[in-house]
Image (cartoon, rainbow, N blue to C red):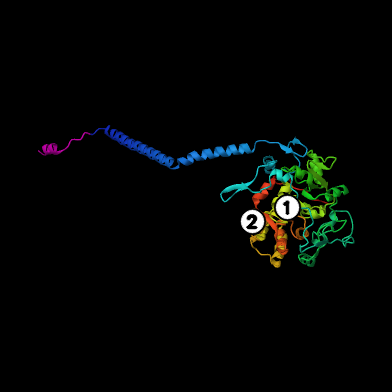
Amino acid sequence: MSSSIFNNNSISISVSDDDPDELGRMRVRVRRKRKKHGDQRGRNECTQLLIRWFVKYWILLVFLPAAALLIFEATRIGKKPGLAVNSGVNEVKKPGSLGNIEPISKLKELSNLNRLDPTTHVVGGVRERCLKLLPAEELEHLELPLNEESSSNLVKRLVYISDQETPYGAGESTVSWQRINDTRFNLFTGNQTMDEREKSFKVNETAVIHCGFYSENGGFKISDEDKIYMQSCKVAVSTCAFGGGDDLYQPIGMSEASLKKVCYVAFWDEITLAAQELQGNKIGDDGFIGKWRIVIVKNLPFVDQRLNGKIPKMLPHRLFPHAKYSIWVDSKSQFRRDPLGVIEALLLRTNSVLAISEHGARSSVYDEAKAVVRKHKATPEEVEVQITQYRKDGLPADKRFNGKKALNEASVIVREHTTLTNMLMCLWFNEVVRFTSRDQLSFPYVLWRLKVVKNINAFPVCTRKDLVNSMGHIRKAKPLTN
């Protein structure tokens, strides 16, 4: 009976050795199905994410490849090989291998050389030229006033200090003139004392000042033939390259009248002469290369070639004694406008006696001093000496002077030769001799000290860009050595 109850109420379960395997396979199949389902869901989520990202950023996907293509094409076009034209001798030459030529400068030369297209800017919503010259037919008949200056000027006469019996002794050695008594004053400059410096800024009818060419033994020797030529100039455009630093760029854009009335003079030393002859630029029997009269200067007075370059830059009234107007152009630039038209536009039309560009990056002497040190253009010690003196003299830190920027860039200088502008340039030269060669630091100071010079045309940067094609310096100038 008990056996019967057991049989009736029990559940029969068949047990086999194969059962565990079958269950295991079922579990494995179930797990595999779950895994497969998870992969599919991950792929769906990834696809949806990519679609959402594409919808959101499809503009970038189109724009970036297009921009990359444009940049590539622009770079390829910009590097297209070109020919450097020496318009002075009417021949095409290959770039030379002389000196430490910088690739960027060479690219600038190839792209900027001989460009005559005008520089423009927008004024009142209208685009116009930065430099407005007279029409070509008027330039051909333009007559600049070459008469003597007005007698109403506060300074009527300049006396340049010189001394044949110098305390330094005689001699023809350039090296013996350098840094007498730990200064850069020498037989060319004379030894200006601080008391003489202070007196030089006082305006009198007769001003007695240092202005280079102190002694016959001071150097900067020019041949008598070149002196006679320069004495004949009434209007002069000048540049210089000492130490073989830069090539010679022929002026362009001038009128026939300017070719007849204007002297183009390039001052070279013997180092530059040798460097240019190696490149095939030889002076003709008439003393010219193209439109430039080449004046070879011997016995340069300074080891620092930058300082030697300040002589023709700042003292053209000493080199061209009968000139009424002059235009200075740095050797890194190609002058590309009619000089008579430039004088009319920047001086006569604005009733100015001197025109110089505003600085493109900064507006204060003190900011410029920091930049000079940061860019290793001068040592911190010599800049500190100069700025300390200017602070002591009371030079303000204002960024505006007479309504214009209080800092200038002096790669192009256009001026009338008057007693007052001649005095201004002499004082400027004395400052770069006494302190650093960075003339941007000293020009605003001299202009501030010589308060009677009011009619200065500080033209905007875009006007300077219209005046010249900028090439940059091709190679470093070699300093004079023992």
Report how far apart the C-alphas of labels 1 and 2 lie in the structure.
21 Å
Q: Is residue 5 magenta?
A: yes
Looking at the rendered structure, the kind of residue marked 1 is: Val
- Residue 42 in the image: above or below residue 234: above
Q: Position of residue 230 (x, y in %)?
A: 83, 49
Q: Position of residue 309 (x, y in %)?
A: 77, 52
Point out the tag, 1 or 2, that comes first from the N-terminus. Answer: 2
Q: Is residue 387 visible?
A: yes
Question: Mark 1 Cα within 10 Å, few/some/many (few <14, many 20+)?
Answer: many
Mark carried by residue 234: none
Magenta part of the chain: 1-14
Viewer-nearest residue: 143 or 379: 143
In this rendering, the label closer to the viewer, 1 or 2: 1
Q: Position of residue 157 (x, y in %)?
A: 81, 62
Question: Mark 2 Cα within 10 Å, few/some/many (few <14, many 20+)?
Answer: some
Mark carried by residue 362: 2
Which residue does the numbered mark 1 point to in the structure image? Answer: 414
Q: Is residue 32 magenta?
A: no
Q: Position of residue 270 (x, y in %)?
A: 83, 46
Q: Is residue 474 visible?
A: no
Snapshot quadrant of residue 252: top right
Looking at the rendered structure, the kind of residue marked 2 is: Arg
Viewer-nearest residue: 185 or 342: 342
Q: Residue at x 13, y 39 (%)?
A: 9
Left or right of residue 187: residue 78: left
Viewer-nearest residue: 2 or 345: 345
